[in-house]
Amino acid sequence: MRVYSTGWAVGVTRGDVAPEGTAVVCGGERLSYGELNGRVRALAGRLRESGVGPGTVVAVCLPRSIGLVVGLLAALRVGATYVPLDPGFPAERIDYMVRDSQASVLLTTDTGPEYGGVARIVVDLGATGEDPGETAEPDLDGELAAYTIYTSGSTGVPKGVVVPRRALVNLIESMRALMPMRPDDRLVAVTTVSFDIAVVELFVPLTFGATVVLAEPETTRDPAALSALLVDSGATILHATPTLWRALLAHEPAGPDSVRGLRAFTGAEPLSDRLADRLRSLAASVVNLYGPTETAVWSTSAEVSDHRPAPIGRPVDNTRLHILDERLRPVERGTVGELYIAGDGVAHGYAGMPGRTAERFVASPFGPAGTRMYRTGDLVREQADGQLVFVSRVDRQVKVRGHRIELGEIEVALERVDGVAEAAVVLRQDDNGEARLVAFVAPPLDGADVRSRVANFLPGYMVPSVCVALESLPRTANGKLDRAALPEEQPVQRTPAASDEERVAGLFAQVLGVAHVGVDEDFFAAGGHSMLVPVLVNQVNETFGVACSMTDLVAHPTAAAFAAAVVSE
């Protein structure tokens, strides 16, 4: 049995990290390693007093803050399994995750709501807490779960991926090799804690005595603010999805200037040739990463060169890749096959879903008895140099702004909306190559109203950009839904009342990457999202010589209203 103590390499548990060094920064708060260690020990003591220990599940629903980092580390320190929850998710979804994970306690703030009927432990985000000093820490079996993270589920409910400590340790050590740091390095963490990329951002720098700069939520949605944070914090590393990189680089001139000289890491969705070239021209280095949640974040890596398309690379440490046909036979090099992943990073499976686990985590014919491999559903091809290139998916799972989404879950949520008899969701790309979700519902309802109401059931990244109402959904001859026959969405149009309205509508269309946007059409209903808002605001300010803000667009989301309130006043 391999043993993993809670000192699995995070700097707050190691004696070779200078206690006065800066560990975490968020907004105006800064914690040294000594202070962070004290707060982690204090909260770990409170968890133990509440009966939390190895095998216990702790739901963590805290705002993006230093207290969030403390909560995750404290749960790991006592040997518990943490379940990261984004407070911005719909309450119903959070409640489901708390109950489904069988959490025994919930870490929250004094104003946080109750979820799942479990005991709350209130975390004072500003308190230092009384440091109880060093305590004996148990040695822990590597098969104990470290965290359970929820992803979109095709059955209509999210599914929890249970990741053991040995997989977390392997991830940390693999990323230490790919992302070496010194104490003077600064990594700006931009990913929500409910997305597994955050594991790398929050933990890896702490193993080196480097600094985690925790970007606040509003900063991650505003390229101008993120650019300023990168510069002001002295950032040396940024680890982000291609969508965020594109939004950052689109903000001229500050965005490209703030990226210059950074070490850039990207993954969670395909890296386009255009973005790869742009990043290489600015960053000190660019690494493309690939991996599903079920194999602990990243399973392959590739240094981005001039090769196109950018490969997803070779396996990280203690990871084995198999490209197989439908009968689990290896395909020849250069032939497209489905990727299966084996090794130390493979998760236990899905919480409370033995059938789904057996379907995706299968026995491996290539290793010792008992070896399992994860069926990714990704089609790849091995190049002559041994690197893998992503080709496509084999199912209806998609990636939008880095988030893995089951289209079936959105369809189930849409059919929960009063009046919706049937629904279909597809992924389409605009003229800028930006992926967006388009929903079709029947019978004909107010599409904008349906979209608004489904937001009560889904996190923001899963809410369709456009909802098109039809008399009925198209069917094939045998009565099945004919997705290929779903029409192109048609924007509402009218003749603009003034030239300013038309010009603003033109900017809407340009930023959204569509041919036309009507002056009465809602920017967000037409496919706009938080990453595009600052791009549009910047375009409007430059075009009209005004100084509007993102809040102006939120308050006046149509071209007609926006022009009247900001441009023509």
Image (cartoon, rainbow, N blue to C red):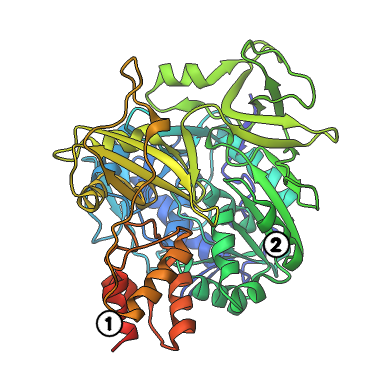
Q: Which residue lies furthest to the front in this view?
A: 495
Seen from the viewer's position, the closer of residues 169 and 551 is: 551
Q: What element carries label 1?
A: helix
Position of residue 127 relative to residue 384, above or below, is below
Q: Is residue 41 above or below residue 312?
A: below
Q: Where is residue 451 in the image (x, y as percent from the top left)?
A: 26, 49
Q: How crowded is mark 1: few (under 14 residues within 10 Å), some or many (20 or more)?
A: some
Image vertical order of residue 186 relative to residue 55, above or below: below
Q: Position of residue 408 (x, y in %)?
A: 36, 32
Q: Which amino acid does label 2 sit on?
A: Leu
Task: Name the front one of labels 2 and 1.
Answer: 1
Whether residue 166 is visible here, answered yes or no, is: no
**Closer to the camera in the image, 339 or 494:** 494
- According to the picture, the residue beneath numbered tag 2 turns out to be 279
- Residue corresponding to mark 1: 565
Point out residue 79 in the picture as x, y percentages from the top left corner: 48, 39
